[in-house]
Every structure is written in C-alpha cells, then in structure tokens.
Amino acid sequence: MPRTLKCISPIDGSVYAERPVLSPGDAAAAVDRARAAQPGWAARPLEERTALVRAGVARLGEMNDEVVIELAWQMGRPVRYGGEFRGVDERASYMASIAETALSPIMLQDDDAARRMIRREPHGVVFIIAPWNYPFMTAINGIVPALIAGNAVVLKHATQTLLVGERMARAFHEAGVPEDVFQNLVLDHDTTEGLIAARAFNFINFTGSVGAGQRIERAAAGTFTGLGLELGGKDPGYVMEDADLDAAADGLMDGAIFNSGQSCCGIERIYVHESLFEPFVEKAVAIARAARLGNPLDPETTLGPMASPRGAETVRRHVAEAVAAGAVAHVERFAADDDGCYVTPQVLTGVNHDMAVMREETFGPVVGIMPVSGDEEALKLMNDSEFGLTASLWTRDVERADALGARIETGTVFMNRCDYLDPGLCWTGCKNTGRGGALSVIGFHNLTRPKSYHLRRQ
C-alpha cells in the first residue's frame, strides 16, 4: 500500500484527513505535465490569464463557509474569525491590478536605429511549498502572481492542512485554469527533495522553518534553481514614551496571541519605555486573561488549540525555562488548558535575552516584555536576534520611527500596527528569516526573469 499523510486534528486528536503520497515516478510525471502545459499558458494574453486567476479566487470565496469549518478542524483557528478569504482577496486583487504595469517591458530605445528593451519572462514551473498556519494567504502570495506571469504552478501543502491544496486546485480548475497548469501534489519529504535535486522546477517558493529551508537549499545545491525562502521570526514591538498606550497594548497583544500565536510575523517580544512599563504590562495581562480558550467550532471561542502537540510543547518549555530562570508568569492556567494543544496565553516579565523565550522562535501565545530606557537600548535588543522579518514601533512621531526603522535589521518596519501584510509592499526578511520577496511589483519580478533585447535595424 502507498504511504499516506495524515492530518491529526488539534481539536480532539482524531485523524481528520488522510491522503496517499505520490510515488517519485508519478510525481515526476505530474511535473512533466506542468512543464508541457506551461508554454501554452504563457502564450495566452495577460488579460486572459489575469481574468482566469481572478475567477479562481472568486470561486474559492464561494467555498468559504465550508473552508472555515475545515480550517478549524485542520489547524484550530476559531470559526468566529471567518477564515482567510478577506486577506486572500485583498492580496490577489492587488496583484492582479498591478500585473500589466509590473510585467511591462522596460523600453530603453525604439527608433529608426534600434529597439532596446528588457522583458519579464516566466520562469517555467514554480514550486510552492505552503505552511499550515495561514494556509490560504501564504499560498496565494505565490500562486496568483506566478500564474498571472505565465508560469505553471505545482503546490505542495503542509500535512496539517491537507485539504487546503485540494480546495485551491478545485477552485482554480472550476474557474477555467487548466488542470496541468495548476496542480496540487501530495508529496513526502524524500520525493520533494528528489525533485528539487533533479532540477524539476525553475523556481521554488517556501514558507516554513529555518531547518526545512536549509534542507531545500541543500537539495537545490548546484542546480541554480531560484529560491524564495520565508523562514523563522522573532518579531519585536517597541512602545515609545509618547505612544497611545491603549492602542499599543491592544495591537501588540493581538499580534502576540491571535491564531494562538502561530504567525510568521506575530509579536514574540515587546520592549516598553520604562515610563510606561507597568501600565502597559497591566493592560497586556488583562487582554491575555480575557481570551476564551476552547473548541474552535464554538463561536464564542477567541483562542483555539495550537495546531500540534509538538508546537504546544515548545511553548510550555520556553515558559517553564523562563520562570525557572527568574521570569514572572502573569496569567493563571486556564481551565481549558489540557497539557496538549490547548495552551494558556502567557505574559512574562523579568525576562532577558539569555532566555530561549526571548531568542528562539516560540510560535505560540506567549510574549516576553522588557523595560527599556530609550531608543538606543530598544534598538540593541531588537537587533539582538538571528531573525529579521518585521518590527513594530509605537509612537506619534513618524520621523522618529522612520529614522529608527532605518537602523533595525528587519524586512518590514511597522508604525502603530503589526502582524499585517500590505500587498503593495514587498514581503521579505533578512538574516535567518530567509531571502527573496513576495507581493508588490517585486513579487512579480521574483517570479519572472529579465530577458534583454537589442534589435538593431539595418
């Protein structure tokens, strides 16, 4: 019998979905079909490709009532939040709206002597390896611009969200995108790495852990395959002395515990000017205590289970180690905390950068808060990380935030908000967060290659 992948639901530990993995031969054949179909897809007018992709996104939206329930069962997000379609639609619509401009040739000369220009060409077959934490939005970041630009797309979704790839493929196929142009494949790690090493793809877009990103880089070594990697994060927030205290507490705590803290750009550490430290902590603790932990199918639940026992164990270990080293945990254990996937949200003070909870990616509903004397100390602490995805600054002074942001080692600087992807801006990171960039004009450029023309007239 073929090996299967199983989605174990965090709601009750049951097997929610199970799918057989493709054999290496069948997987290679599927990629071959994508490669054969890609030139015909690229030959279609840009307007036609864009319209079909828009229709696929709209069809996905029509499935949202079913999708919301499936997400709760697969990765634990409460149904009260209504799924991810609003974000999917925002990103897809923006990328579609800028496609003509982003993909237009750069014309340097067109006169009696010559035509000189740079065109954007599709890579060919783009491989997208999507994560489970925001399974539709992270996937759409690559799928939409890749297809619009004329690439074929092969999607491999996380085991925890097995049904998401199927939903996306069904929606796009029903809207008219050819089946071989957009394929969802169920692959194990060995087959995935084998395809990459065999140069089956022209570009690979991966979102996930640093360790998995390193495995992809090793598999691709020597193939010269382009890589876009969004890996770990330990995103900081900094509350300056002139900040709106209520807005800062509400915004940063939402960034820390929404989606059970399982967000690539979630807030994992907060630095607060010493003049606001105590009132900020008081507000943060009140927000955490007000969360309602429980079954995500219950509309009253605001905090669902973490997606897996392994992730929950990391959270509990980081908290326990911090407390043993002198940190103070301010939130009492919730009744719904089952020592499994259901985890009490936690606010820690008395923390420092010797503790894993302030240095390693926790990826759960816990945040450490430290007082700082001012911008210089905050900057030093924010940059004291192996990661660099986002940083969130809370102040009334735009110029101060701009100047400080220039010195922060990060991919995105927020002011008075956090945990958000603006599709008009490039989503990128530095250090161990990875490389490349999604969304914006740059997202289109990363999913295409430049091709130069120097056509000299006689």
Image: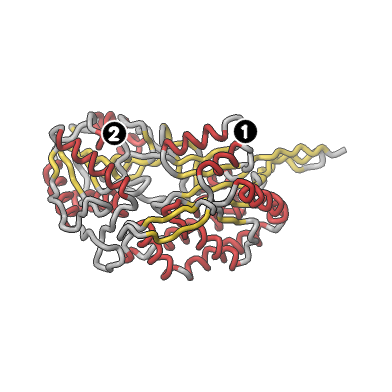
The reply, left or right, for residue 455 in relation to residue 175 is right
Say which quarter of the image contains residue 219. top right
Counting from the top left corner in percent of width and height, residue 66 is at 43, 69
Q: Is residue 366 above or below residue 88?
A: above
Local crowd at mark 1 within 10 Å, few (<14), some, or many (≥20)?
A: some
Counting from the top left corner in percent of width and height, residue 114 is at 79, 39
Counting from the top left corner in percent of width and height, residue 147 is at 60, 54
Q: Amino acid at mark 2?
A: Arg
Q: Quadrant of the C terminus?
A: top right
- Residue at the far front in the pictured view: 1
Viewer-side residue, 380 vs 9: 9
Residue 223: mark: 1
The reply, left or right, for residue 169 in relation to residue 411 is right
Contact (Cβ within 8 Å) of mark 2 with mark 1 = no
Local crowd at mark 2 within 10 Å, few (<14), some, or many (≥20)?
A: some
- Residue at the far right in the pictured view: 458
Counting from the top left corner in percent of width and height, residue 30 is at 64, 52
Please give the name of the residue rendered at 71% of the width and 38% of the height, measured from the top-left corner: 452
Q: Quadrant of the N terminus?
A: bottom right
Secondary structure category for the residue under label 2: loop
The reply, left or right, for residue 131 in relation to residue 36 is left
Q: Amino acid at mark 1?
A: Thr
Disc 2 or 1, which lies upstream in sequence? Answer: 1
Viewer-side residue, 24 vs 403: 24
Q: Which residue is mark 2?
A: 359
Viewer-side residue, 112 vs 327: 327
